[in-house]
Amino acid sequence: MNKITHDRRSTGFTLVELLVVISIIALLIALLLPALAAAKQEALSVACLSNERQMGAAEQLYLSANNGRSFDWTWGVWVAPLAPYVDRRQAVFICPSTTVNTAFLSANGGQGSANYAWQWNAPANYVMYKSAQTTFNCSYCFNGWLYGGIHGSLGSYLNSWDEGQSPALFYPDDMTSTNFSPARIPLISDGIWPDCWPDANNPPPINLDYTPNVWQYPSLYRVCINRHQGAVNVAYLDGHAGPVKLIDLWTLPWNQTWVTRHPLPTLPSR
């Protein structure tokens, strides 16, 4: 009679085999996570650019409806006059790479950071431009040199800071009289305060995520932030938008007398 033999070897994995498989999976995860994170950041940047294009188009519609003249600085935060010309209203004004952090806003006077939107509250009895809204959250910064209207009081405000600012730097209402193409003039950028008045001599910020008391500095401090992997998104006066490396912010004609200084400033490490 033939003896029936039994294979007593286990059909499962040995401990060594399991450890090898786990190590391979861990290695693959370690390799894929940075790529997935980068892909997510790129997707957020693309969505941000879409927001800025809508705001750029809104500016064009506003100019068309107002004889080519931009809104006045004294009408309140620039979000109010542009809001009627964009879809989804508030969502357009929040970069998807940022959130509204009420605790941060309360502790920092309403200013934002690379990761947080800013908040502007209308003072008591302030007359907003065609808007009953008094509190605005936004992740973007308007180029103040493009405000329309009389700049007398605004010029005094700017000259109170020792940064060589002058009302003569404002772009004229008639853009045909400027030396720069609208396709090069920054309109709106990622930012941590409602507006800015950059000067070619502005130094770089000490921190690329957050500048304390940024309302004291109407300069590139307000837009030179590490929001999109070493870059910010900028919408231009002609309506298009694109990413700009932080160091290249000093090469854009923010005002009508802009002359790029060389060498460009050295930015702090991220």
Image (cartoon, helix red, strand yellow):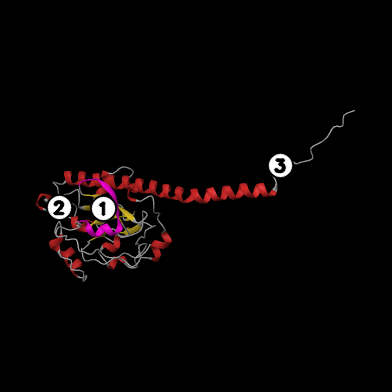
In the image: residue 46, left or right of residue 25 = left
Q: Quadrant of residue 99?
A: bottom left
**Residue depicted at x 17% and y 58%:** 255
Q: Position of residue 242 (x, y in %)?
A: 28, 48
Q: In the image, what residue type sits under mark 3?
A: Gly
Compared with residue 41, is residue 166 higher up or lower down, i.e. above or below?
A: below
Q: Find out whether the residues at labels 2 and 1 contact each other: C-beta distance under 8 Å.
A: no
**Residue depicted at x 79% and y 37%:** 7
Question: Residue reaching furthest right?
Answer: 1
Task: Look at the image and say whether residue 120 sits in the magenta stretch.
Answer: no
**Residue depicted at x 61% and y 46%:** 21
Q: Residue under circle 3?
A: 12
Which stretch is magenta? 238-252
Q: Earlier in the sequence, mark 2 or mark 1?
A: 2
Question: 127 or 160: nearer the eye?
Answer: 160
Q: Residue under circle 2?
A: 180
Closer to the observer: label 1 or label 3?
3
Q: Earlier in the sequence, mark 3 or mark 2?
A: 3
Q: Residue under circle 1?
A: 188
